[in-house]
Every structure is written in C-alpha cells, then in structure tokens.
Image (tube, grey):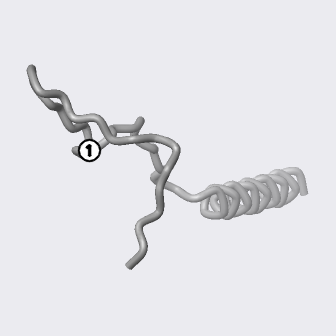
Amino acid sequence: MAEVKSMFREVLPKQGQLSVEDVSTMVLCKPKLLPLKSLTLEKLEKMQQAAQDTIRQQEMAEKEQQITH
C-alpha cells in the first residue's frame, strides 16, 4: 500500500502525560413530560359534559312546564 503523506506530521510527547479524550459519556437532557390525558380525550370529555348539561337543562325546563300547567 502506498502511504499518503499529509501536510501535518504526528507528534508524540516524550515527557509528561498523554491524554486521550475519546470517552463517550451520556448526556442528560430535560425530561419531557407527557400529559396524562390526550388532547383528543379532553375534547371528548368536554363535549360529553356539554351534552349532559344540555340534557339537564332540557329536563329542568320540562319539569318547570309540568309544574306551571
């Protein structure tokens, strides 16, 4: 194999310490909080509550009409 000469040459220290910082460490990030209820479920619950409120109002109106007649 032919060696490719680069414009930089490798220099190793003859004294002191040689440190290599190639150790991968885990990086902690902020936890992502997930809602306990999905938005769709919340919308469905609101719609159901509104429907129940409407039925209650209609029943109250019918009772009032029966009392007045």
Q: Position of residue 33 (x, y in %)?
A: 45, 44
What is the secondary structure assignment of the residue under circle 1?
A: loop
Pick the quarter of the image with the N terminus: bottom left
Q: Residue at x 12, y 27 (%)?
A: 14
Position of residue 67 in the picture relative to residue 3 (left or right): right
Q: What amino acid is found at the position of numbered circle 1 in the picture? A: Asp
For image coordinates 52% across by 44% down, the residue present is 7
- Give coordinates of residue 59: x percent, y percent: 76, 60
Within 10 Å of disc 1 (Cα), the crowding (few <14, some 14-19, many 20+) is: few
Could you tell me residue 13's position as x and y percent?
Answer: 18, 28
- Most foreground residue, 11 or 35: 11
Q: Is residue 53 left or right of residue 27?
A: right
Q: Is residue 10 above or below residue 6?
A: above
Determine whether, in the image, residue 17 is placed left or right of residue 31: left
Q: Residue furthest top?
A: 16
Residue depicted at x 41% and y 67%: 3
Left or right? Give the position of 14 relative to 41: left
Q: Nearer the viewer, residue 61 or 50?
A: 50
Q: Examine the image and state in which quarter residue 17 appears.
A: top left
User: Nearest the camera: 65 or 7?
Assistant: 7
Which residue occupies the extreme bottom position in the image?
Answer: 1
Q: Which residue is mark 1?
A: 22
Give me the residue at 64% from left, 56% from top: 39
Q: Quadrant of the C terminus?
A: bottom right
Q: Position of residue 23 (x, y in %)?
A: 22, 44
